Amino acid sequence: MKRIYSLFIGTASILLLISYAYISEFVIQHPSETETMTDASANSLEDAFCLVCQGKQIHPWEQDGTAYFFLPSYFNWENASWEASRGTLEIDGKTVDFFAPVSFELDKEYDYCFSSIHTKSEGKLRFLKSANIGSVFVETKSGTMNRVDRDKEYKEPGNILITDSQGSPLYEGNLTHIKSRGNATWKSKKKSYGIMLSKPADLFSMGESKSWILMSNVFDANKLQNKISLEMAEAFGLNYTSESTWVDLYLNGEYWGNYLLCEKIEVDENRVDIEDLEEETALLNGSLKNIQTFNTRIQRGSLADQNPDNITGGYILEVDHHYSGPSGFVTTNLTPFTLRAPQYATQEQVDYAADYIQRLEDLILSNDNELFDYIDLDSFVARYLLEELVWNYDFGYNSMYFYKYKDDPRLYAGPAWDYDCALGRYTFMSTNILVVFNLNNYKGTGNPVWYPQLYENDFFYENIVDTYEKTVRPHVKKLIAPGGIIDQYADRIRSSIAMDSIRWDYVETWTGHYEAYENNVRYLKYFLARRLCFLDAEWLEEDNHYAPEKGNGQWHTVTFTSGNGSKTFVVPDGSLIPEPPDYLLNEGEWWHNERNWEDFGLEIPIYEDFLFLASG
């Protein structure tokens, strides 16, 4: 992350009493958050036989009668061996010699039979191999992920090996802990995790740290959205944005899928390089975790007795409608903030942060130009442009971070975080609206209204248009160009995605509009192209077209079926879905995609066959 340095002076105002219960009504949930918590599917072959490479076991994954070996990028048969639990393994009728294993072709189907005193299993066997990305092997102390996946607060120690794509170790040793994390992702089967190494490590040249995030990208069919969004944030000028890279994750020898390894948002010279107020406070009070807490519903924190002489920084604050964490406050406009640093803030620190944010919010809502003395204009503009461009469903509700230095009157927007529910996900597909005014519909209901108000400010608006034309548009054009950044990234992770899509049921998590990975990548470029066209017209009064492709010449069928009959259209690849035959619907019914139950949307280009069913 980039490092920047500034000064800070704070002000104060009085926080009105409001109900914490009222806040809970405004928690925004992803569609998947209604899912029932379940453990990942049991692997019946886990203790039967496995491959070993560089000292790490890789167990087969069984699904629908086929056992899959998902192999890391660096795997080769010369350095591999077999292990089995006192049994015999036959592949295509030939007994496998565990001491002199032969190689097998990738993505070819074999017949296997494993026999032991206790069990016999047989079926099909396939070997798939990743390419171009590193690997993370975690072995928990218990040998399972059961408790980690059931309890988001539980931390389990273990061992970890992190390698680059060639198998060279980047870190090997004790793992202080692994824990589940996230909100919607935690309720899915493919969870995101936080890991704490026993000592700092510079992983993939992202800077030394102990704390890292393994992001599951479970709701993202192209597995590119978070990566390119974070890189756009950095390109647009949001300092301290997390660097990231894709890895294949193995948990206790079982392939867990394609993950995005990210820097954690935290106070550190290699992360968010602000003053460590929590460390200063702990030096005066001892461990803050063991000190009594307070919770007035509009404020919460630690009852530590002593404070540093200067408590004007540093702070990391998150607009967080889950209102999570041990410290936080709510503004008079019912905007909930969680203090991510200091995590265990004292009463005086919570008061200071709450008063400061309240004063800033009042200035924004009154459109008082004094507000520009209290915000970092460049970062606020960059944050808005990113959120608007990618049509972020969570914009203004969750994962909206700010930070503040000591002895500096300004609040800085960022770092950017969490974009799996952006870029045309679910039914949020409209490319020709301003998201900022979608937020404006929620004024006075506990949702932040900062950006709708800022957008109406002439000075802020001028900076939006200027930055969009000079910085945002050129970068996005490089992303969507044929053979550009998106295509290059898709090529890089394609082999890993082939394994991940077998390991996890994409339909179950509403992942993507299309079945084929390539078509979900095409849609990502299409969506960004359409957003550029709209924003060019809206801000620059230019009529431009950036679509990277016009179709591949194939034809597809789009069928609408209800209890009243069916209607099928035959349309060329790349065209939009035709107007649906609503005359086939009964009152109260609408169309949904048969593959993933996604609601019908007119802005979905046809890249493959579609079937829409009536529901009510």
Image: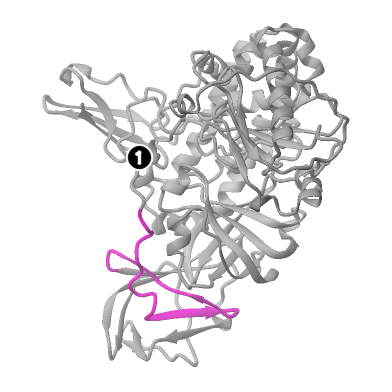
From the viewer's perspective, tell me whether residue 481 is left or right of residue 420. right
Q: Nearer the viewer, residue 189 or 229?
A: 189
Displayed quadrant of residue 146:
bottom left
Q: Nearer the viewer, residue 222 or 208?
A: 208
Displayed quadrant of residue 88:
bottom left
Q: Nearer the viewer, residue 511 or 127?
A: 511
Is 21 located above or below residue 272 in the figure?
above
Marks counted in the figure total 1
Identify the main secondary structure in magenta.
loop
Mark 1 lies on residue? 34
Q: Tell whether position 48 is magenta.
A: yes
Q: Considering the numbered disc 1 on the image, is that residue within a helix, a strand or a loop?
A: helix
Residue count near mark 1 (Cα–Cα under 10 Å), binned few <14, some 14–19, many ≥20? few
Q: Tell whether position 260 is magenta.
A: no
From the viewer's perspective, tell me whether residue 582 is left or right of residue 75. left
Q: Nearer the viewer, residue 555 or 120?
A: 120
Image quadrant containing the C terminus: top left
Residue occupying image coordinates x 59% and y 58%: 247
Displayed quadrant of residue 47:
bottom left
Is 338 located above or below residue 204 in the figure?
above
Q: Residue furthest left?
A: 564
- The image position of residue 237, as x and y in percent, is 76, 31
Q: What residue span does the magenta drawing correspond to?
A: 38-65
- The image position of residue 278, as x and y in percent, is 75, 45
Residue occupying image coordinates x 80% and y 40%: 307
Residue type at mark 1 is Thr
The answer to whether any part of residue 474 appears in the image is: no
Image quadrant containing the N terminus: top right
The answer to whether any part of residue 505 appears in the image is: yes
- The image position of residue 356, as x and y in percent, is 73, 23
- The image position of residue 569, as x and y in percent, is 26, 27
Is 64 located above or below residue 253 in the figure?
above
